[in-house]
Amino acid sequence: MRGEILGVERRRYWGDDDKLAIVSAVGVGGATVTQVAQRHDVTRQQIYAWRHELKRKGLWSSDEGALFLPVGAPSLPDLPAVTAPAPTIWIELRLAKGRMLRFESNIDDASLTRLIRAVDSA
């Protein structure tokens, strides 16, 4: 197979802010890692590597549900009480042939069974 060089290749530089924005885009509006990777023209593996790097640097945490208020804010009695939803726990299940399923802990048994069978038969 012969290739043709069309231009000068250059290595792109991604700053921590750029990496954080891309990694944080996963899950927003149901976006998967693959969709975010395609949108930013990077590989899925690169997003996972950035996630690991940002966690190690203490710049990213997958914990959600934090509520921030301005310092010294007066009490706001007219605001409705905010109740935090039950935290979603992700479970990873390793199957035969190196396959892995990742699903929320609140999935019902019938759906999980169908999902496992579908992945095993693929």
Image (cartoon, grey):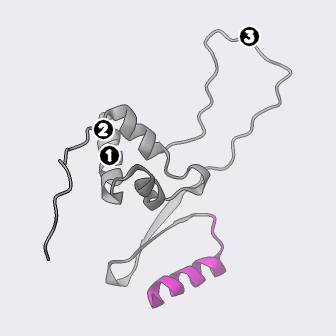
Between disc 1 and disc 2, the foreground one is: 2
Residue at (84, 19) in percent of width and height: 77
Height in image: 121 above or below 16? below
Residue at (16, 64) in percent of width and height: 4
Q: Position of residue 34 (x, y in %)?
A: 43, 61
Instruction: Name which of mark 1 and mark 2 comes first in the sequence.
Output: 2
- Label 1 – label 2 distance at C-alpha: 10 Å
- Label 2 – label 3 distance at C-alpha: 40 Å
Height in image: 70 above or below 79? above
Where are the magenta residues, as a range? 106-122
Q: In the picture, which quadrant includes the C terminus?
A: bottom left
Asked whether residue 52 is in view, the answer is yes
Give the amino acid at mark 1: Trp
- Find out whether the residues at labels 1 and 2 contact each other: C-beta distance under 8 Å: yes
Position of 58 with respect to 33 (left or right) is left
Q: In the picture, which quadrant includes the N terminus?
A: bottom left
Q: Position of residue 24 (x, y in %)?
A: 47, 43
Name the residue that disc number 2 marks.
Answer: 14
Name the residue that disc number 3 marks.
Answer: 74
